[in-house]
Image (tube, helix red, strand yellow):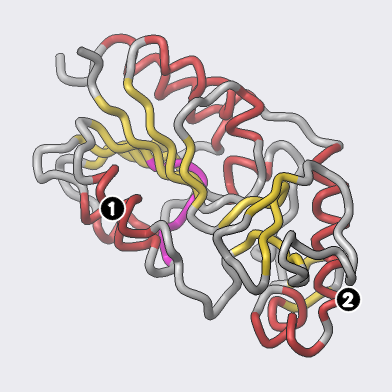
Amino acid sequence: MKKRLVVLTGAGISAESGLRTFRDSDGLWEEHRIEDVATPEAWNRDPETVLRFYNLRRMQLAEVEPNEAHVALARLERDWDVHIVTQNVDDLHERAGSQQVLHLHGELSKVRSTGKPSEIHDIGYTSLSLGDTCSSGFQLRPHIVWFGEAVPLIDEAQAIVSEADHLLIVGTSLNVYPAAGLMHAAPLDCAIILVDPAPEMLQHQSERITVINEKATIGMSIVAGMLSKGIDD
């Protein structure tokens, strides 16, 4: 039976594909503040601006490709039972070939009903407009967990991490809760690898954490070699 490798990923793994994030510099994305486009209050105040923002992000996503870090993770499924828990809303893990991906913060290529949240539709990279409704007539909204909203899949993510034989963290500082608590759900005997060019988690470093001070693409090439040899040996 394959050992379980749980991978926590964040914006850093997709940045090398050309996707910008709110953390790029001054907290802006295409000159928008988080408060203006990624909160329930923004949606209630100005849904057209919110829809336009996510339409642009979908257009950008259609123009980029998975990078070598995404591909390396997909290849690990040959020898490992790989489960990816990502904070990213892009589909680059899936496009690289990863089969088991849980999106903590939603998915950019999907929309859901404002009146029936369980009704979710995949719209790919197309646009969403005011007046686009679900089967019951409710306006559709981006299938994104906005700032200030609950993270409905956090319990499922914790359950996945709790059964990890090895935990790999790539492209995320894990500074934002509740995702920040996921590492602590790992079993005490679970080896942890952190790939980050400037890890802020060093203050939590212990004997079971191996830190690779590299960006995602270079770091994943190193990790792939480590895991192919067996880090238990």
What residue sits 15% from the left and 14% below the top? 233
What residue sits 89% from the left and 70% below the top? 131
What residue sits 37% from the left and 27% below the top? 82
Residue 37: give x, y in percent of width and height.
Answer: 75, 75
Q: Which residues are magenta?
A: 169-175
Residue 132: give x, y in percent of width and height.
Answer: 86, 64
The residue carrying mark 1 is 158
Q: Nearer the viewer, residue 229 or 61?
A: 61
| Magenta span main SS | loop
Q: Amino acid at mark 1?
A: Gln
Q: Locate residue 47: give its quadrant.
A: bottom right
The residue carrying mark 2 is 48
Q: Earlier in the sequence, mark 2 or mark 1?
A: 2
Answer with left or right where residue 82 lies relative to residue 24: left
- Distance, label 2 to label 1, CA atoms, is 35 Å
Other residues around mark 1 within 10 Å, as few (<14) / some (14–19) / many (≥20): some
Q: Residue furthest front?
A: 136
Other residues around mark 2 within 10 Å, as few (<14) / some (14–19) / many (≥20): some
Q: Locate residue 216: give its quadrant.
A: top right
What residue sits 39% from the left and 14% below the top? 225
